[in-house]
């Protein structure tokens, strides 16, 4: 079906469109209701259907001829090891680990926090939870103990699953001390800790509380997949919003499975048996959707890569993996390609590898800037697809759907809305804007399958954060425009969310950390452009009366505070001491204007500004000419 036909069908007849997609999956009880739009606040998909995501991802394929196909390759340049599991082997491991968790009292609806590096067991843990109907919440390894504690307190897990360490290039990151600190900081007491000992670092175990992964598996009996309702939660994934408190994005089982299955064919052009590689991390939504669930539900072979695009050992790492596993489609963040470009601008390393299996390169997580797009296109010689999505949607909102059509790409554009998404560019009063005018990117309700069920533990936050601005629409938080051909250009966040090296973080949360420095009276943290990481935080700081320090000393202190309180991924660019912060007369800091000045963008001085001279000072300090 062509893109336009599929798009129109999904918008005009969503029930028929998505029912057709749902019919391609194995349900224990087929849904009779496609979408229940009366369900508060955005609709429930396939609400009376019963299924199990793990069953769809594994058992179904084992029973239908894929038992001996590799389900996941594990490739770890940081430990110099490689392995693979066929669908049958992965199912066996998952069923046993699910049995082990069940023996610890984990059951349907219980939360399980997974704090693990990029190893096969992380995928096993996620699928085992899904098998039991337990709700997993994976926490990215690059977060500090305090962030892990916040998530533990919010999700209130029955169990936490971890490993003794992660490995960052050559550095061993001991996970257990981080987890122990988080457990001390958290109010919620966790009954069960299960730890996988990795040979690179043996962790101390707390007797009576900590269980050894291999021990409990050795004693376990395999667990069958538990039928769950389509709208039961599969996972909670915390993501940064505008406040310090991360949002627990809750995803359902059925809508998620249907959307991901559809996306593999329509967007990625991947067929069962193809090798699909998302070079991301299971701690992010890309990892949930496209390392674990989507490739498996679609009967593809996935790759779990414990390495970096550069340094493990060099900027040829991606090309080596593509050659070795005959990857058909790769998906990563532009920052990863910028890192490769910096090391190997002419693509000399690429020429050493056979990339004949590769058909398409997908990028997301941040804006794909035209120079990086052009560079990747020239040196890889394959279509480069920039596609836009969010943790909230679980799959892409805009893309060049290569499985449906051969739409011409336009540099700087994420192409067109994917079937299922009714996209509008709205002005601040909620009125649709004409072509080429920048505004708020909003999506008309109901959202397609896969969209978040709600925010865990806060029934009002979905409405307040996303639906309150424009009645009948989901507000994405991104700004952009559509051109005269309907192509969508995503220009960046309109709120306080930034993307550092593809990691989504909140400047609001950073301000809370910066504000905790003993010499700081007030501050503003904004994201500014960075050559490799895309964006980095810059802090403007007003000192307390009588306090004395320098930019350099303060930058060092704040970088270290961000690292210990948020995590090493919250890398600080610079802190500047200022005499005053630009504010409105009501005292609101003009963060957007500061951001515009720092990035050399046009800005409008609001009529409500209190002291316009403060802007000149800021421009002198952080403007593009300084
Ligand atoms: N566990 C522990 N620490 C981690 C970590 C993890 N999972 N991930 C990153 N860190 C640490 C790094 O070791 C580094 O620490 P350091 O300051 O002590 O060296 C710090 O966090 C910053 O890491 P990172 O943001 O990864 O920057 P980098 O300079 O090490 O690498 C890139 C830059 C571009 C190579 C890397 O960020 C990358 O591959 N990004 C892609 C991100 C991605 O896939 N996003 C998902 C969207 S598709
Ligand atoms: P995350 O929830 O971590 O996936 O981050 C989502 C945010 O990343 C979006 O709201 C955008 O700001 C940004 N983003 C993701 N993909 C793209 C893209 N292709 N182009 C521009 N920004 C993107």
Image: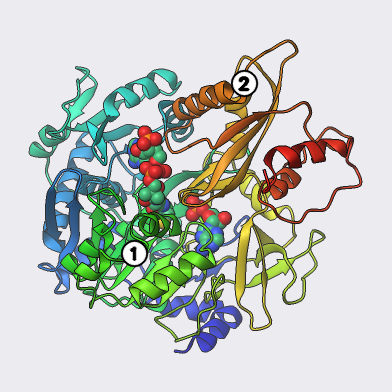
Q: Relative to residue 432, is residue 198 depicted above or below? A: above
Does residue 558 lie above or below 423 as drawn? above
Name the residue tied to disc 2. 550
Say which label, 2 or 1, has the lower sequence index: 1
Q: Give the label on residue 560, or none.
A: none
Q: Position of residue 336 (x, y in %)?
A: 39, 55
Q: Quadrant of residue 204?
A: top left
Choose between 376 and 62: the one closer to the eye.
376
The residue located at (26%, 28%) in the rendering is 174
| Closer-to-camera residue (259/33) | 259
Q: Tag 1, which secondary structure?
A: helix
Residue sticking out furthest to the right = 607
Q: Is residue 82 left or right of residue 286?
A: left
| Pointers 2 and 1 in contact (C-beta within 8 Å) | no
Seen as rendered, the residue at the extreme front is 625
Front-most of residues 331 and 209:
331
**66 to 542, vertically: above or below:** below
Residue 538 to residue 471: above or below: above
Q: Quadrant for ligand 1?
A: top left
Q: Quadrant of the C terminus?
A: top right
Distance from disc 2 to disc 1, alpha carbons, whole Å, reads: 50 Å
Find residue 273 and report its horizontal and vertical position in percent.
Answer: 21, 74
Crowdedness of circle 2 by 10 Å Cα count: few (<14), some, many (20+)?
few
Q: In the image, which disc is placed on residue 294?
A: 1
Residue 274 on image: x %, y %: 24, 74
Count every numbered label the image shows and give the total: 2
């Amino acid at each position: 079906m062509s893109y336009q036909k599929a798009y129109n069908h999904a918008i005009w007849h969503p029930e028929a469109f998505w029912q057709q997609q749902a019919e391609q999956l194995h349900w224990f009880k087929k849904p009779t209701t496609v979408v229940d739009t009366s369900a508060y606040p955005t609709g429930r998909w396939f609400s009376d259907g019963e299924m199990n995501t793990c069953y769809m991802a594994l058992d179904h394929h084992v029973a239908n001829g894929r038992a001996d196909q590799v389900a996941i390759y594990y490739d770890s340049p940081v430990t110099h090891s490689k392995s693979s599991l066929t669908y049958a082997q992965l199912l066996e491991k998952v069923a046993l680990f699910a049995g082990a968790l069940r023996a610890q009292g984990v059951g349907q609806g219980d939360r399980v926090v997974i704090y693990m590096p990029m190893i096969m067991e992380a995928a096993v843990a996620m699928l085992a939870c899904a098998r039991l109907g337990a709700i997993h919440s994976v926490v990215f390894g690059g977060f500090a103990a305090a962030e892990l504690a916040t998530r533990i307190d919010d999700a209130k897990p029955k169990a936490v699953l971890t490993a003794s360490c992660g490995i960052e290039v050559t550095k061993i990151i001991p996970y257990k001390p981080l987890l122990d600190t988080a457990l001390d900081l958290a109010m919620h007491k966790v009954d069960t800790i299960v730890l996988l000992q990795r040979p690179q670092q043996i962790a101390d175990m707390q007797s009576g509380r900590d269980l050894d992964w291999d021990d409990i598996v050795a004693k376990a009996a395999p667990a069958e997949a538990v039928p769950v309702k389509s709208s039961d939660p599969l996972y909670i994934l915390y993501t940064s919003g505008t406040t310090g408190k991360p949002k627990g994005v809750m995803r359902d089982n059925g809508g998620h499975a249907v959307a991901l299955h559809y996306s593999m064919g329509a967007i990625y052009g991947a067929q069962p048996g193809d090798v699909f590689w998302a070079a991301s991390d299971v701690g992010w939504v890309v990892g949930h959707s496209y390392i674990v669930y989507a490739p498996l539900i679609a009967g593809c072979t996935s790759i779990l890569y414990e390495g970096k695009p550069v340094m493990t050992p060099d900027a040829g790492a991606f090309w080596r993996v593509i050659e070795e596993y005959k990857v058909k489609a790769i998906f990563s963040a532009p920052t990863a390609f910028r890192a490769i470009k910096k090391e190997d601008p002419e693509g000399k390393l690429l020429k050493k590898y056979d990339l004949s299996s590769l058909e398409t390169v997908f990028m997301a997580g941040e804006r794909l800037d035209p120079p990086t797009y052009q560079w990747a296109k020239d040196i890889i010689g394959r279509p480069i697809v920039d596609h836009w999505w969010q943790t909230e949607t679980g799959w892409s909102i805009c893309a060049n759907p290569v499985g449906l059509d051969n739409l011409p790409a336009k540099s700087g554009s994420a192409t067109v809305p994917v079937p299922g998404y009714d996209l509008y560019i709205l002005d601040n009063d909620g009125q649709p804007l004409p072509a080429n005018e920048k505004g708020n990117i909003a999506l008309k309700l109901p959202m397609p399958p896969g969209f978040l069920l709600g925010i865990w533990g806060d029934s009002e936050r979905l409405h307040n954060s996303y639906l309150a601005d424009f009645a009948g629409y989901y507000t994405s938080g991104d700004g952009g425009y559509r051109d005269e051909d309907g192509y969508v250009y995503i220009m960046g966040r309109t709120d306080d969310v930034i993307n550092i090296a593809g990691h989504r973080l909140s400047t609001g949360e950073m301000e809370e950390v910066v504000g905790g420095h003993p010499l700081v009276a007030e501050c503003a943290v904004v994201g500014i452009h960075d050559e490799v990481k895309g964006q980095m935080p810059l802090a403007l700081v007003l000192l307390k009366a009588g306090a004395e320090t320098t930019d350099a000393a303060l930058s060092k202190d704040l970088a270290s505070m961000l690292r210990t309180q948020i995590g090493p991924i919250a890398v600080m660019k610079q802190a500047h001491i200022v005499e005053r912060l630009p504010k409105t007369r009501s005292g609101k800091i003009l963060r957007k204007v500061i951001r515009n000045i720092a990035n050399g963008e046009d800005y409008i001085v609001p009529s409500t500004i209190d002291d316009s001279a403060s802007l000149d000072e800021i421009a002198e300090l952080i403007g593009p000419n300084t």
